[in-house]
Every structure is written in C-alpha cells, then in structure tokens.
Amino acid sequence: MSQEDDARFTLSIVSENEVGALLRMTMTLARHRIRVESLTSTSDESAGVHRHIVVARARPDRVRRAMKQIQASVGVLAAEYYAEGETVDREVALYKLDVDRLGDPDSFRDLVRARRARVLVLGETYVIIEKTGCGREIEELYESLRPFGVMQFVRSGRIMVTKAGPAETAGARASSGNRANGG
Amino acid sequence: MAREVDAAPAGKPVEVPPTRTVSGSEAVVLSLLQEGVETVFGYPGGAIMPVYDALFEYEQRLRHVLVRHEQGAVHAAEGYARASGKTGVCIATSGPGATNLITGIADARMDSTPIVCITGQVPSRMLGSDAFQETDIMSVSAPLTKWNYQITRPEEIPSVISKAFYLAGSGRPGPVLVDITKDAQIGTLNYRTAEVREVAGYRPVPPLDAARVQAAARLINESTRPMVLVGQGVLLSRAQAELGALVGKAGLPFASTLLGLSALPRRHPLNVGMLGMHGNYGPNVRTNECDLLIAVGMRFDDRVTGDVSQYARQARIVHIEIDPSEIDKNVKTDVSINADAREALAALALAVEPASHDDWLAGFRECDRIEYERVIAKDIHPDSPGLRMAEVIHELSERSRGEAIVVTDVGQHQMSAARYYRFSEGGRIITSGGLGTMGFALPAALGAGIACPGRQVVAVIGDGGFQMTIQELGTILQTGTPVKMMVLNNEYLGMVRQWQQLFFSRRYSATELANPDFVRVAAAYNVGGRRVAARGELGEAIGEMLDAESSWLLEVVVEREDNIFPMIPSGAAVSEIRLE
C-alpha cells in the first residue's frame, strides 16, 4: 500500500497530566509509522488532564492498532479517532504580509472580508491577517494572499468536536468490523 | 493517586510506624518491604549509592544479590518473577547501569513479566546538563515499559513505588521503571506507607461479559473440529484448573504456544503439542483445517501464525485476552472476550455442553504418528555417531520426570527443549519468547533458583548464548545458588547456521565459534562440571548433574550441523510446515 492510500484521521486522546504522557503517545504513533500533520496539546487544569488532538495520515489498520495500544496505555483516559468529515474542526492561522505589496487597500480589504478573515495588526511595514476556519479555508486564503507576498505564515493545530456519538465513528466501526485477517 | 494508610495492612511482612522522618533512600527500602519484596538483584554505582547505603541497614530483611552486569540483574528478576509469580525487582545506577537494563526490560515487556526496575539518576538540578553518567532513561525506556516515572522529590517515593508494583503485577503484567534522582534519595520525608490500588483510566481486569461467554459457548457447542490455543496468559492468571475443566468437558484438543507449554501436562490426553515455527506437525497443519480456534491468553505472534493472511481462514475464532489492544491486532475474531483468563474459562466451562471429538482428535494422533516416524524417532534415537540435541533433552526429561524448572536460552537448543521436554505437573518452562534474548538463561535460572529453593532448576543453553552472560557464574559462586547448567555445544550459532544452510546456500557467515573449555571456566568459579560427547555416557552424566547438590555444568558436545524440524519457513502458511 503506498502513501497515496493513506487516509487522514483526527485522533482525540485524553491523558493524565504527567511528564512523559505526550512522549509515550507520540512514540506509539511513530512506531506505527503514522505521520503527524498537526498536534494540539492542552492542559485542562480543572480536570487535571491533558487533551491531545492529532491530525494524522496513515493506513487505517495502522491507526486502529496504534489507537488500541494508546488506549491501553497507563495514564490514558480516553482515545478515539475519526475519519475526515466526522468532526467539526477549526484552526487558527496568521499571515504576515509586506504593506508595500498590498496594492489597492480597498480591494485587499474586500478580499480579507470575503474570506472571513480579519486584520489583526496593521504595522508601518507589515500587516498581519488572522483567519479561523477549517484546514481547507486556511489553505485557500494562503493561496489568495500569495500574490501579495506572504512573509510569514503560521497555523495552529486542529481543535474539534464530533458530529455524532462515538459509536458511529470510524474508530467504532473499525473495532466492530466483519471478520477478515489483518496483518 | 495514592490512598495513604496509617498502618501496614494485615499480613504484610513489615510493621512501620505510621509516620517518621526517613531519608528517601530508606523510604525506597521500606516501600519495597511494604510490597513484600524479599530479594532484589542489582549493581551499585554513584547515583544509586544512597539506596545501597540504606540496603546495608536492612540486609537481614531484604536480600540483595550482587550480579556481574546489570543485564544479569534484570534477567534474574525476570526468572525470579516467572518462577515465583511475584514481581521481580532489580536496581541499577544511572547512565550505563540503567541502559544495561534495557534488553531485559524489552524482554519482560514482550513476555508480560512483572518486574520493577529502580534506577538512580543524577541530582534533579543537573538533569539535562549531560552530567557524568546521566542518561535520559525515561525517554529510552518509555516505549518498552508498561509505565515509568521519575521521582525528584523524596515524598513521592512511597506512593510511586506502590503504584509501580500495582501496575507491574496487575492486568497484563509487565516491566515498570522508577528513576530516582540522587537528591530525592538523600532528602528526607515524613514516611507513611502508601497502598496504590487504583489508577485513573487503568482497568486491569475488565468485567466479564456474560453474553460473549454465551456466544463463545454456542460456537464451541456447534463446532465439530475445535482446537484451543493455550498461551502464557493461562499461567499468569493461574487458570490451569479452569482450562483443564473446559477442555475436558467439551472434549477440546489443545495446543500450546512456547510460553504456554507447561500450563497443562504434556501427557494430558487432549494435549496435541506445540504451535509455531518449530512446533508439532498436527496442531500447525490442523490450524488450517479446524472449524473453531479458541485462543486463550496468547497474542497470535508471527512465529505462531506464519503467514497471517493464510492463517485459519476457514475457522471461526474466539479470543480470550486480558489486554484489549491484542484483540483483533493480528487476527480478526468472531467472538472476543476481554477478560481475565481464569474468570472467562471458569464461566465458559460451565456454559459449554459435554462433548467429545474423537474422530477429530484421532486426526491429530495420525499427524503425531507421521511426525514421530519422520522426525522424532530420528531425533531421539539417531543413528549418527554424534549426540543430537533432541536425545539430550529427551534424556533430561526422562530423568527429571518432567518436573524441573527448565530455563532456556534462545536458539536450536530452546526449540529442542520446547519440543522434547515433556512437562508434567510442577514442571515449568521459562524462556525468552517474544524478544528471543540470547544470554537470558543463565541469569534467569539464577533468579528462578533463588525464587524456588529446593526445586530442580536446569538451564539449557547453547554455547553462543552461554557466553553472552557467562559472567553470572560469579553470582552463582557468590550466592551458592544450585543452578544446573546444560550447555549444548555445537560450536556454532546453531539456529542462524540452520537458516544459512536452508535459505542462504550454506554460506556460514560469522556463525562458527571457537569456544573455551567450559568445564574449566566453571571450575574457576568453583562450579563442578563434566564434558560428555559419547551416547553411552549421556544418561549417567545427566543423572550426575541432577543429583548434584550444588551448581553443576554439564557440557554436551552435540552434532555440529543438526537441524530443528519440523519448520514453517519464514513467510509460509502454518499448513506448509516442513518435516525435513
């Protein structure tokens, strides 16, 4: 199976807030040759836990195995995974542009507004645009801004909530699939 | 995390006042005593010296076995754990001491062996500074341990060590590493015993799902060609009696993995032998003929399944397994029971209907006949002038009545021991299965001998593996542990040579060994011994070894180019097993 056969998944893992928890999780993903596209790790101090959201590309069987091992790890409280389309997700991106290359201010402002982005900082030599959206929207805005000379572009990892209950997700389907030898 | 208690629970071997001020290192020792530890295996060094200083005070209550290399400590702890059912403990210093434990930790992880490894670490203020003998053992050991933790404050010690023992020994057992910085060892704490028996998110024994038991029972009742696969999980959950009840009631032939071999006696009327690459002909071939596989406490390792895409495709599969991540990992199941094997087997034994499968069983016996004629008879009654490994093990099995604790190393002798030692009640195999760690046997046998004084412990070792941890003869000398060592010497790394013969056109690359005089080496360590090469002397020499009251080394010179058959070639289906 080639890399083209890899699918994109969103992994959601809740672990104890302990030194090394992130290391164990990412080591397991690496062992199964799962490529991490983004990782959002946040501490929920009130609950005393860490929440990790990983966007990953890999063969589905590798994701299934890795997630079962992560779920079985000491210190992991929950581990679910979702196929594309099963979640409502958002990322934040910042685009830094050269003011001198923006051209007509009105048309630039219209472009930003049409993409549902906003001007975060307007400096003497640069402007910073902020965009919240799904990954596709972030990338589309980047393509639109490229002609203006993007000096810096950074984007956050993904945060997400599920559309359906866990029983209806890719993870649930994988663990109750029909008999077929894996390997 | 910790539920602290004011006094030691009833039945514990040490009474500790509710609170008193002690050093971190003394707290380590008190915590080990609190867990019922009697023996630890270790090797001192700079970053663990405070703990060793505390051990000095407690040497009457906590025995420390000084090994000759930290790898010896961890394998000895494994052997101790496997023989006793208790959690083994080893101690090492930071840096090289800690990294020398890694092979054994990986071994324990693969074979589900409960051990707690305690390592010293540089002072917390120096972490990350590349201090002398500093290694990031937490990161190094993270993928190999069931859990690891670095203690930087003395007050963490009681609860973390308690948690370490709870995690190592519960559910699917495994290795836990506790790294303790030197300042945490030197600092003081107000010591209170801790008993951690609950960890967030950790469910060691899932509740038994009665509906799944009924579903499995239905499959068993409907089956005409059933077969049970017995893994080490049966031994770990002490489910031998429940397994015997199930197979006896439902008339189920059963075969064992390498680690499950001694779960039920070899002579049991439904025992059809060993699975896997060098297992018996019948259970391998019939895996692809049965209509139902009931796998208990095993993980469908590739040495058992061969080409998994051709594995038991015609059969329905029931998998009883305590680790949920093993279910559907390699082989998809029809009914999975994620539970403790003992509990599941007891319920299943009640739920199945009495049955027998005489015709199906007779087919196994026909396979046995074929294997005997084409392999076994030649192995144990050879016409070659030189001794063969199989006849040596056969003789050992006969003379020890299958009752010994047999500790093997890895290679041809291991497979011979697994195939030809006929375990009876009380007999036990301790071997490195998953990781295949050469050098395992000698220190593991030492650990088993210390765990089970009075038992006959025989280490069966090849000449290659023996030299990987040969320095532990020094530990045998110092402790006086009566370990019987049987070195099968073919002056080759035999299994690699066999593969080179069969699959690499006899190009024997780096497999021939020039060996020392093993008997003289043993003598230098005050271990008696004998070298035997003649068939006529073999039985008497084995008897002499078994009768020896102290350690003994028997070097048996065997055929140089002996091969282990049957054999499933790598990547082939189990049904493609070769008899020659």
Image (cartoon, grey):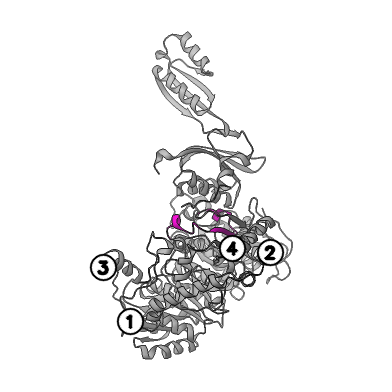
Q: Earlier in the sequence, mark 1 or mark 3?
A: 3
Q: Nearer the viewer, mark 4 or mark 1?
A: 4
Mark 4 vs mark 2: tell me if same chain.
yes
Residue that badge 1 annotates: B517
Q: Nearer the viewer, residue B248 or A154?
A: B248
Q: Secondary structure at mark 4?
A: loop
Residue that badge 4 annotates: B223
Number of marks present in the image shown: 4
Residue B120 image point, x, y percent: 51, 60
Q: Are marks 4 and 3 in contact (CB under 8 Å)?
A: no
Q: Chain of mark 2?
A: B
Instruction: Tell me the magenta residue range.
Output: B306-329
Q: Earlier in the sequence, mark 4 or mark 1?
A: 4
Q: Secondary structure at mark 1?
A: loop
Q: Earlier in the sequence, mark 4 or mark 3?
A: 4
Tell me the residue at 45%/90% (across/down): B544
Task: Tell me the number on the disc at residue B506.
Answer: 3
Q: Earlier in the sequence, mark 3 or mark 2?
A: 2
Q: Chain of mark 3?
A: B
Dot 4 amino acid type: Ser
Task: Tell me the number on the disc at residue B361.
Answer: none
Q: Are marks 1 and 2 in contact (CB under 8 Å)?
A: no
Q: Give the alpha-carbon distance from disc 4 to disc 2, as whole Å.
A: 14 Å
Q: Secondary structure at mark 2?
A: helix
Residue A18 image point, x, y percent: 58, 48
Q: Earlier in the sequence, mark 4 or mark 2?
A: 4
Q: Nearer the viewer, mark 4 or mark 2?
A: 4
- In which quadrant will I find the N terminus of chain A? top left
Residue that badge 2 annotates: B351
